[in-house]
């Protein structure tokens, strides 16, 4: 599938963060600070050299202009040496509104 086809298939638009945004995440035996490369209403792409496997459940905490966001997510895809795409599975309505209105 081409990059263009993947973009059209996506449910939410992605926002690129060239300088990155910090996220604290933990899942499995790991707890790390990482940078977010892209974000959307549906999830994040987190830069990490050795990501956990697809299906790993994570807890995330990051800051947007509206305040701190706490969420639960699941690893949907990994790119070895680069990072992981995670999908939000639990995000409070207040956090979703802050996230959406301030970032997207």
Image (tube, grey):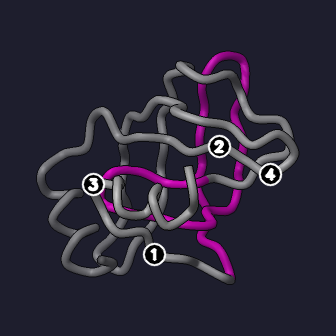
Q: Residues under labels 1 and 2: Cα distance?
A: 16 Å
Sequence-earlier tag: 3 or 2: 3
Disc 1, SS: strand
Instruction: Give the overall secondary structure of the magenta segment.
Output: strand
Q: Which residue is mark 3?
A: 11
Whichever of callouts 1 and 4 sits on the residue coming sooner in the sequence is 1
Whether the magenta-drawn stretch holds residue 41 is answered as: yes
Q: Earlier in the sequence, mark 4 or mark 3?
A: 3
The disc label shown at residue 82, or none: 4
Residue 60, position as x, y percentages in the image: 48, 43
Residue 37 on the magenta span: yes
Question: Residue at 19% across / 45% down in the picture?
Answer: 92
User: Image quadrant of residue 18?
Assistant: bottom right
**For residue 54, what is the image quadrant?**
top right
Label 4 environment density (alpha carbons within 10 Å; few <14, some 14–19, many ≥20): few
Q: CA distance from mark 1 to mark 4?
A: 17 Å
38 relative to 6, above or below = below
Residue in the picture at 27% in, 54% down:
11
Q: Are marks 2 and 4 in contact (CB under 8 Å)?
A: no
Checking the image for residue 84, the label placed there is 2
Q: Residues within 10 Å of mark 3 (few under 14, many from 20)?
A: few
How many residues crowd around disc 2 within 10 Å: few (fewer than 14), some, or many (20 or more)? Answer: many
| Residue at screen point 71% across, 26% down | 52
* SS state under label 4: loop
Query: Callout 1 environment at 10 Å: few (<14), some (14 to 19), or many (20+)?
Result: some
* Of callouts 1 and 2, the N-terminal one: 1
| In contact (CB < 8 Å): disc 1 and disc 2 | no
Q: Between label 3 and label 1, give the one nearer the viewer.
A: 3
Magenta-drawn segment: 19-45
Q: Is residue 55 left or right of residue 79?
A: left
């Amino acid at each position: 599938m081409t990059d263009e086809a993947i973009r059209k298939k996506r449910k939410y638009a992605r926002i690129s963060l060239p300088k990155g945004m910090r996220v604290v995440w933990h899942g499995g035996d790991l707890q790390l600070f990482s940078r977010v490369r892209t974000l959307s209403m549906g999830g994040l792409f987190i830069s990490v050299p050795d990501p956990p496997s697809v299906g790993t459940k994570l807890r995330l905490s990051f800051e947007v202009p509206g305040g701190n966001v706490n969420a639960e997510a699941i690893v949907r895809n990994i790119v070895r040496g680069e990072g992981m795409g995670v999908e939000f599975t639990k995000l409070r309505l207040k956090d979703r509104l802050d996230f959406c209105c301030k970032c997207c």
